[in-house]
Amino acid sequence: MMLARVRGNVVSTTKSEKLHGYKLLIVVPIDIDTFEEKGSPIVSIDTVGAGEEEVVMLVAGSSSRQTELTENRPVDNAIVAVIDSVNLNGKRIFEKFPTES
């Protein structure tokens, strides 16, 4: 599993019948130590209703076909969670809805 930020979407009117009706998003992996984007963008199928700029959890390979929406579909990467917060080594490094101090 990895974390990534949603940066855009892919529109495809012609595609495998097994992908009709599914949202494809462009995500960029996040380095968990720095929480900065790293690496190349990835196209991922959205199984949870993620939106642009949200931080999400991805699964790849055979794990990406383990959700109700992706079972027996030609996918290699799936968004399986929208992240609300991340704590690392006792410190909050990400919060979707920051609390006011």
Image: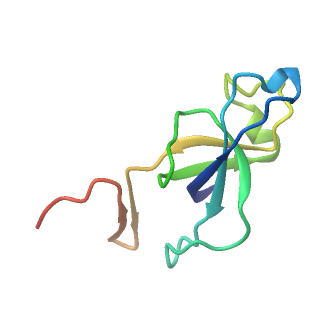
Nearest the viewer among 9 and 86 is 9
Percent of width and height locating residue 36? 53, 75
> For this view, does 83 lie left or right of residue 27?
left
1 vs 90: above or below? above
> For this view, does 22 lie left or right of residue 50?
right
For the rendered model, the colour scheme is rainbow
In which quarter of the view is residue 4 placed?
bottom right
- At 71% from the left and 72% from the top, the residue drawn is 39
Percent of width and height locating residue 48? 54, 33
Percent of width and height locating residue 12? 78, 35
88 vs 25: above or below? below
Percent of width and height locating residue 91? 33, 72
Nearest the viewer among 3 and 5 is 5
- At 47% from the left and 52% from the top, the residue drawn is 54
> For this view, does 78 lie left or right of residue 100?
right
Nearest the viewer among 32 and 90 is 32
In which quarter of the view is residue 89 placed?
bottom left
Q: Is residue 42 visible?
A: yes
> For this view, does 50 lie left or right of residue 40?
left
45 vs 39: above or below? above
Q: Is residue 1 visible?
A: no
- At 52% from the left and 77% from the top, the residue drawn is 33
Q: How many marks?
A: 0
- At 74% from the left and 28% from the top, the residue drawn is 70
Q: Residue furthest bottom?
A: 34
Quarter of the C terminus within the rendering: bottom left
Q: Residue furthest left?
A: 101
Nearest the viewer among 16 and 29 is 16
